């Protein structure tokens, strides 16, 4: 069981690597400052009235991208629809000065259903535009730099929260993802795999996968007054959970979904009691692979 799990993880990690290595420029790479690529989506409008707690954006527009491989020779009859790709920085590559990232290419959730129905932009909230530690000259969370590629990891970003994998033992426990447009209560958040809604907090929804290793997913900052699920509900991968918003208790945060994966060692005691030890895992590689599947038009299952 353990060996096969490791083999599966290794295989999926290799797949993720391959996907990363095959990174080719997308058909229409988002230029710095360009609006999000969501079809039909209006450009983000400035929303200076929104208080920002945990908020901000991401990478600098001139962030260098690693050079891609040389373009392969085109076959005489190229396929009509080549696989979609999107620009994303390497795992663990945090905004300089925002903490020590963790380079982990393991796809901890190989069949993850990308949690944002309309796509999204993984990047930093605190250190991006409009964030508490963001660039001084970019004060709107709806700034185009927050809604542009490439994606950027922010697992282990400097925080006081316990996160054992991070170098200091503390850090950001998940990945922040902005929705397709800078509008709250519009974009659906989706169940990551089949499971049970085990807890709904003030601004959190927790889903535990029904199949081993019973991964725990936690989604923060949805519009909690309009959730599509209740505690105890069974969900399928891709089911609606709620809509991306900025709920964060008393003080709103930026409009985004904070997404976590916890899993660990799964086993059974000699008297048959299932045991799962949980810790926060880097979700970035799983999200990259999942978003690529969404771009490819693959259904969640
Ligand atoms: Zn977060």
Image (cartoon, helix red, strand yellow):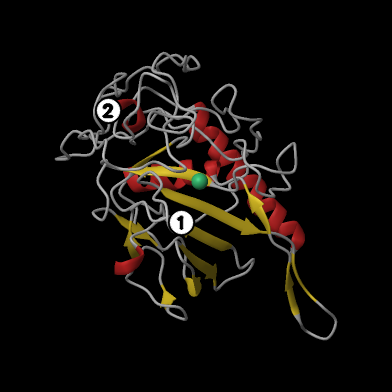
Q: What secondary structure is marked by label 2?
A: loop
Residue at horizontal 27%, vertical 50%?
184
Image coords of residue 26 (percent x, y): 32, 26
Q: CA distance from mark 1 to mark 2?
A: 43 Å
Extreme residue toward the bottom, this view? 271
Is the CB of the residue bearing disc 2 within 8 angstroms of ligand 1? no
Image coords of residue 27 (percent x, y): 27, 25
Q: Which comes sooner in the sequence, label 1 or label 2?
A: 2
Q: Which residue is mark 2?
A: 78
Is the CB of the residue bearing disc 1 within 8 angstroms of ligand 1? yes
Q: Is residue 264 left or right of residue 150?
A: right
In the picture, which quadrant includes the C terminus? Answer: bottom left
Q: Is residue 239 visible from the viewing direction of this image?
A: no
Q: Is residue 170 visible from the viewing direction of this image?
A: yes
**Neighbours of disc 1 within 10 Å: few (<14), some (14-19), many (20+):** many
| Image mark for residue 19 | none
Q: Is residue 196 left or right of residue 85?
A: right
Image coords of residue 45 (percent x, y): 20, 35
Q: Which residue is mark 1?
A: 220
Front position among marks 1 and 2: 1
Rendered view: 47 above or below 144? below
Q: Is residue 69 left or right of residue 116?
A: right
Circles 1 and 2: CB distance less than 8 Å?
no
């Amino acid at each position: 069981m353990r060996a096969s799990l490791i083999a599966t993880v290794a295989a999926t990690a290799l797949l993720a690597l391959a996907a990363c290595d095959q990174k080719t420029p997308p058909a229409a790479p988002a230029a710095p400052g360009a609006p999000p690529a969501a079809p039909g989506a209006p450009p983000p409008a400035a929303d200076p009235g929104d208080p920002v707690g945990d908020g901000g954006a991401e990478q600098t527009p001139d962030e260098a991208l690693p050079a891609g491989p040389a373009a392969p020779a085109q076959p005489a009859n190229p396929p009509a629809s080549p696989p979609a790709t999107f620009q994303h920085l390497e795992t663990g590559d945090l905004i300089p000065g925002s903490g020590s990232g963790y380079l982990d290419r393991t796809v901890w959730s190989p069949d993850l259903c990308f949690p944002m129905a309309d796509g999204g932009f993984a990047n930093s909230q605190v250190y991006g535009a409009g964030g508490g530690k963001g660039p001084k000259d970019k004060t709107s969370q709806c700034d185009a730099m927050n809604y542009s590629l490439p994606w950027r990891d922010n697992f282990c970003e400097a925080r006081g929260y316990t996160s054992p994998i991070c170098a200091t033992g503390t850090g950001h426990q998940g990945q922040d993802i902005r929705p397709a447009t800078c509008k709250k209560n519009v974009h659906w958040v989706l169940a990551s795999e089949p499971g049970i809604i085990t807890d709904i907090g003030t601004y959190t929804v927790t889903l535990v996968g029904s199949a081993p290793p019973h991964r725990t997913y936690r989604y923060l900052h949805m519009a909690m007054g309009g959730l599509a699920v209740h505690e105890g509900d069974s969900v399928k991968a891709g089911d609606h959970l709620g809509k991306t918003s900025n709920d964060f208790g008393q003080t709103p945060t930026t409009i985004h979904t904070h997404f976590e994966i916890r899993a660990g060692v799964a086993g059974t005691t000699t008297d048959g009691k299932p045991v799962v030890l949980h810790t926060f895992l880097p979700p970035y590689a799983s999200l990259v692979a999942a978003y690529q599947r969404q771009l490819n038009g693959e259904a969640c299952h």
